[in-house]
Amino acid sequence: MKANTSILLVLMLVFILSSCEDIVTLKTPSSDHYMVIEATLTNLPGPQKIVLSRSQDYFDNTDAPKIVGANVSISDNDGKEYLFKEAKSELGSYVWTPTTPTDIFGKVGKTYTLTVKAANETFTASETMRRVPPIDSILYQFDEANQRQASDGKPKNGYDAQFYARDPMGMGDCFRVKTYKNKKLFNGTQNLVFFYDAAFQKGAMADGLMFILPIRRSISPELYQEKDTIKVDLYSISESQFNFYSQARLELNNAGLFSRPAANIPTNFTNTNPNSSLQGAGWFGISAVSSLQTIVDPKKARKNIK
């Protein structure tokens, strides 16, 4: 009898709690809207692209509206001007196309100023192309995948690769690494790899050294297989862009029960009218790039790479 009474009380409690459930829809105020720039221009051969869009409210999951009809140009500190034409096939994209195969955008040491005129507003940004060291080599060894490399159905065994490069003498060089496997970029948030001199942090006193091991191994988010092509691009970035990426990473990882309120990320893309309701966001980047690629050959695999 006592058991039946206990069961009855539990059922009544479940019914009462379930009947009290209400769906609450949060009404959040509309946020300020920004003109957002996506641009990393380089000294690599070929066209250069700038993408302009408008920011959205926090819970808006639709595609960001693109900015069309803008006038986009860049000038260097010698007065040379580069005109970016609106791409007909891709809304919000503006492209500079070289006139000859040897016409390359950007030289190390030059400063480039962007001007965007759109929506009766004028935005500007400025960056200097900084030096980048050559990539000396890409080495690999056969190994078992570690916990990071083995997730999401990735290979359990294969070739763990590292790239080798040395930071130039003189403090304050900043870099970003992009890695491609069989021409496909590793572009997850966990693949955002950037660093200061030869280490991850500014205070590491790593000027002029070989890049530290975690940086060298960052090109192996998963193990490679025989005949895979590994391509590594090393981008020079400014210290300001390093700070931009650092803040962006904080916001990307800002989740959980004790997360802090979201904060705006610094930008170098600003409206010439500081009192306008439409301000800028994103980053206008200028990078020199060094590249190296290799094809995985078991006969060329090393042992005990450090």
Image (spheres, rainbow, N blue to C red):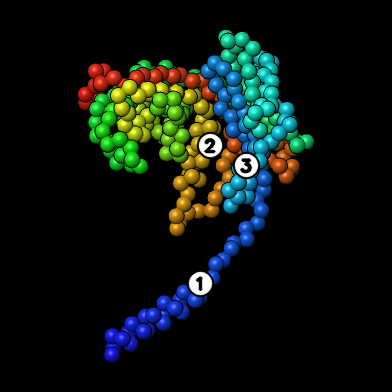
Q: Badge 3, how many Cα within 10 Å: few under 14, some, many 20+?
A: some
The residue depicted at 58 percent of the width and 48 percent of the height is: 61
On the image, numbered disc 2 is attached to which residue? 244
Whether pointer 3 and pointer 1 mark residues with C-beta atoms closer than 8 Å, the reply is: no
Give whichever of 87, 269 is nearer the camera. 87
Residue 99 seen from this side: yes
Q: CA distance from mark 3 to mark 1?
A: 34 Å
In what quadrant of the picture does the N terminus appear? Answer: bottom left
Q: Earlier in the sequence, mark 2 or mark 1?
A: 1
Query: Identity of the amino acid at label 2?
Result: Phe
The residue depicted at 31 percent of the width and 39 percent of the height is: 150
When the figure is inspected, residue 300 is found, relative to residue 215, above or below; the finding is above
When the figure is inspected, residue 264 is found, relative to residue 109, above or below; the finding is below
Whether pointer 2 and pointer 3 mark residues with C-beta atoms closer than 8 Å, the reply is: no
Q: CA distance from mark 2 to mark 1?
A: 43 Å
How far from the left and from the top, in percent, is residue 229?
A: 37, 22
On the image, numbered disc 3 is attached to which residue? 64
In the image, taking residue 270 as reference, residue 181 lies left or right, namely left
Give whichever of 278, 186 is nearer the camera. 186
Give whichever of 88, 291 is nearer the camera. 88
How far from the left and from the top, in percent, is residue 175?
A: 46, 27
On the image, numbered disc 1 is attached to which residue? 21
In the image, taking residue 106 as reference, residue 33 lies left or right, namely right
Q: Earlier in the sequence, mark 2 or mark 3?
A: 3
Q: Badge 1, how many Cα within 10 Å: few under 14, some, many 20+?
A: few
The residue depicted at 50 percent of the width and 72 percent of the height is: 21
Q: Nearer the viewer, mark 2 or mark 1?
A: 1
Query: In the rendering, which numbered label is found on residue 252?
Result: none
Q: Residue furthest bottom?
A: 1
Q: Badge 2, how many Cα within 10 Å: few under 14, some, many 20+?
A: some
Residue 198 seen from this side: no
Query: Identity of the amino acid at label 3?
Result: Ala
